[in-house]
Amino acid sequence: MSTRVFSSLVEVKAFAWKGLTGVVGRNVVSLYALQFGNCVLPLVTIPYLVRVLGPEKFGLVAFGQGLMAYLSLIVNYGFDWSATRKIAVQRDDPDAVNQTAASVWGAKVLLCAITSLVLLALILSVDRLGKVSLLLVILYGTVVGNMLFPTWLFQGLEHMTIISVTNLSVRIVGALGIFVLIHQPEDFLFYAIVLSAQSLVAGLIAAAVAFKVFRLRLTVPSWKDLKRSLAEASTLFLTTAAISLYTSGNAFILGFLTNSLAVGYYSAAEKIISAIVGLLGPFYQAVYPRFSRLACESRDQALLWGRRMLAFTGSGTLLLSVLLLTGAPLIVRIVLGPKYAPSALVVAIMSPLPLLIAVSNVLGVQIMFPFGHEKKVLAIVVAAGLVNLTLAVLLAPRWQAPGMAVAVLTSEAFVTFGYFGCAWIAKINPLRIS
């Protein structure tokens, strides 16, 4: 083994160790508990749900969840990144943190009211949505729960343990509720009720904990504060909105282009991919405040951390992608059952996503955002969203779930290579030694 290779391995090991000790390490563990509740724990219930509900009813709920993902996007508005970054800087000033928290929550309440009117208008004007109006109204509880849950506040203050435990406890109770209440395809509304209830309860508890732990004061933000919070998050909102065009809303897009059965096959496969991708999600979130500070303090240190993170996460996700590609039929047969055999092709097509997302997260979120290149990120993801919609319209009606999978994979590859090129030109690509 050459000295350079050995040195690189030592760097990666040192980076991993630093990431698992101290404040960042505690937040990684806490965020993994949060992620386990949001993404991984459902995998315990998914094998049961897909078999009991069947592809069509499971797909119907996924269709509704896709619409809620768009509405939640509007309510969250990019605050998960803008407010986190701002509070990370204000952490030693309790009054400033309180003012930021009040203005963010106030803005989210306003946006939540707007989305409720949007949902009502869609139900009344779109026949496809009107037929499942009860399902959509029930699922809207997940939007309200997202409005209440202050991940941005706890993450910015690097104090995630309490709400992670709270969220995990609520999700476990919700998982038990699924086994108790859902026994046949006609119980799909009970599934929607469980999803909304656990989101609402988690949001209420987390908000109450935030007020107690950080001694927040209940204040009404001024209109000026609301506008400033919205303005600060506007570019990030547009970015996340564009990202949603090729990520969270695909079940909704596919449902409009095809049918609930195709959505069921696609969504079941997507659950598997999302669980795998989610394995590194907490790590990305925990190190984001550190990258934000390093970008202000030392360009070289920020890029060094970026280079180590690419090596650490890239090697792990490459292995995961290979396992998904080669083991897709077996994974689907074990997790989803024989009725979902068409989902195996979808899993295989989307198998490179863990690697692509790992690389794009480091280049885009951890490097380009902190160095002030939000507009470049926005341009790339908007283009990727348009690529996804175009390919979906062209491919999904004919090839259904696999066609949607090809559209998603192409869009994610477009983003990853776009970030790589822009970061290289801006001389902030961690792989560029200068």
Image: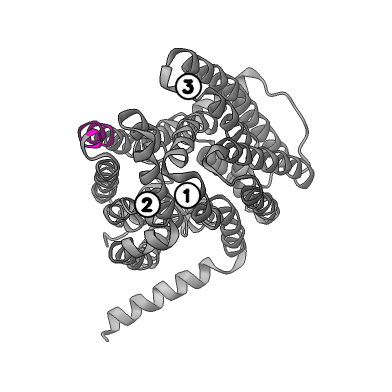
Residue 404 lies in quadrant: top left
Q: Residue 131 — which label?
A: 3
Q: Nearer the viewer, residue 51 or 110?
A: 51
Q: Is residue 392 magenta?
A: yes
Q: Is residue 101 magenta?
A: no
Say which label, 3 or 1, has the lower sequence index: 1
Give the vertical position of 138 relative to 43 (above or below).
above
Any part of residue 304 in sight: no
Q: Which residue is label 1 attached to?
A: 50
Give the vertical position of 411 relative to 330 (above or below).
above
Q: Main secondary structure of the magenta part?
A: helix
Q: Quadrant of the C terminus?
A: bottom left
Q: Which residue is label 2 attached to?
A: 340
Q: Secondary structure at mark 3?
A: loop
Residue 191 lies, in percent from the top left, at 58, 41
Q: Secondary structure at mark 1?
A: helix
Q: Nearer the viewer, residue 392 or 354?
A: 392
* Magenta residue span: 386-397
Disc 3 residue crowd, few under 14, some 14–19, many 20+, Cα 10 Å: few
Q: Contact (CB < 8 A) between labels 2 and 1? A: yes
